[in-house]
Image (tube, rainbow, N blue to C red):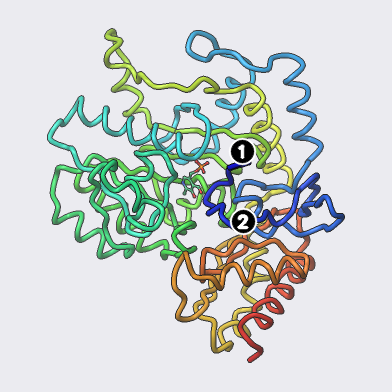
Amino acid sequence: MRPRLWHPFTQLRGFHPLGQVVAAEGAHLELADGRRVIDGISSWWVNLHGHARPEIAAAIADQARRLDQVILADFEHPAAVALTEALRPLLPAPLAHVFFSDDGSTAVEVALKMAWQHQRSRDPKRQRLVALQGGYHGDTLGAMSVGDRDVFTAAFAGMLIDVELLPFDGPAAAAALRARGDDVVAVILEPMVQCAGGMRMMPGVDLAALAAATREVGALLIADEVAVGMGRTGQLWAGAHAGLAPDLMCVSKGITGGSLPLGLTLASEAIYASFFGEDKRSAFLHGHSYTGNPLACAAALASLGLVAQEQTPARFAAYEGVYRRWFARLAAHPRLADPRALGGIFAVDVQGGGGYLDPVGRALQAEALRRGLYLRPLGSVVYLMPPACLSLDALDGVMQILWETLCAVLGTP
Ligand SMILES: Cc1ncc(COP(=O)(O)O)c(C=O)c1O
């Protein structure tokens, strides 16, 4: 077979890319053949303020001229220090310490390993990781282990850590956790919205109940804010909807505004303290070549500046209002169910859908693209998560395109 580009999450037999993207600006992707399409999913939920923001591009270029990369094991550098300082007042209590990695999966791996090592040094009978059914935390082995057992993990069944998966129902999960007792290392969850698992939303009170049970059984709470953080849900951190006080928090995707990969694991004072001491063996012996990459840190700093100036969380809250105005019409369509929204995230299910592999997703994607909107449905779950640079009128226009797409593929009610 001829060597070719191996696309992620893709069966390459018979596959043809949707096009070649040669540029992007604001909410638009520009294709080599001249088409301009709206990036309805923020290029996998990373882009925050629109593509090619000059402030972020300038910060990266300026940093690249001064310091492109340096090992973070023996040195610090101004961009990493400044980012740590800038983040501190924004973090939910009790988080204070910042560990850098490369992306969402590595941020999760770091959190799991920190939780495990912390508990082993204090209470070694705790050997069980707990997560929620339907969750997704990344594609490295630890992150996959705490995700749902589904089409993504089936091929790797024998390689995964044995994890207790509780129902995606706060009170039921809280009861199961209490019944389980005191051997739990940590509970990891996506606050408020399970994104890859189908944009499933949990009420804040239910999430708070689960967090309280986690605290009661002495387990650590790991909030995976990789997808929902950075204002997407109308709060800077989605956990704020439920008053979450996590011991560890994972951040990536939107932290750089969607320009460069960067992962952060934020840890509480208590966790940091258990790694602090004379013996190197009690240190956190983990790192990646690009840990704390200066270009990514500079991009994140510039993006945080934009978050502050443009109040992205407030903007995403306004997006929710636009989505909600479409709910009655969507709910009345005989083939659609459960329109839902939180901040900048909107989703609706195609009734009787066959999950992630349902071909209706591809049909909807092709139809939307013809109409100038890029979507990537999760099988029968259709969703939007656009950059926050769209005006409210433009977002309403996106909903109009989405509605016309749904009617074209599923039939007009
Ligand atoms: C909640 C959550 N955690 C972790 C990840 C993994 O992030 P990455 O793809 O950057 O490794 C994702 C990716 O979609 C995610 O949605």
Quadrant where the image shows the N terminus: top right
The mark that comes first in sequence, 1 or 2, is 1
Quadrant where the image shows the C terminus: bottom right
Q: What residue is rendered at 46% in x and 26% in y?
A: 99
x and y, in percent, of residue 151 in the image: 39, 57
Mark 1, secondary structure of its residue: loop
Q: What residue is rendered at 38% in x and 42% in y?
A: 143
Q: Residues within 10 Å of mark 2 (few under 14, many from 20)?
A: few
**390 or 29: which is nearer to us?**
29
Q: Which quadrant of the structure image shows residue 55? A: top right
Q: Residues within 10 Å of mark 1 (few under 14, many from 20)?
A: few
Q: Which quadrant of the structure image shows residue 128? A: top left
x and y, in percent, of residue 42 in the image: 66, 52
Q: What residue is rendered at 85% in x and 54% in y?
A: 33
**392 or 381: which is nearer to us?**
381
Q: Which circle marks residue 3 in the picture? A: 1
CB contact under 8 Å: marks 1 and 2 = no
Q: Amino acid at mark 2?
A: Phe
Q: Amino acid at mark 1?
A: Pro
Residue under pointer 2: 15
Q: Is residue 370 above or below residue 190?
A: below
Q: Is residue 128 left or right of residue 56?
A: left
Q: Is mark 1 within 8 Å of ligand 1?
A: no
Q: Is residue 169 left or right of residue 183?
A: right
Q: What residue is rendered at 73% in x and 65% in y?
A: 369
Q: Is residue 98 left or right of residue 15?
A: left
Q: Which quadrant of the structure image shows residue 398? A: bottom right
Mark 2, secondary structure of its residue: loop
In this rendering, which labeled residue sits more in front, label 1 or label 2? Answer: 1
Q: Is residue 360 above or below residue 216?
A: below
Q: What is the residue that sits farthest to the bottom in this orientation?
A: 413
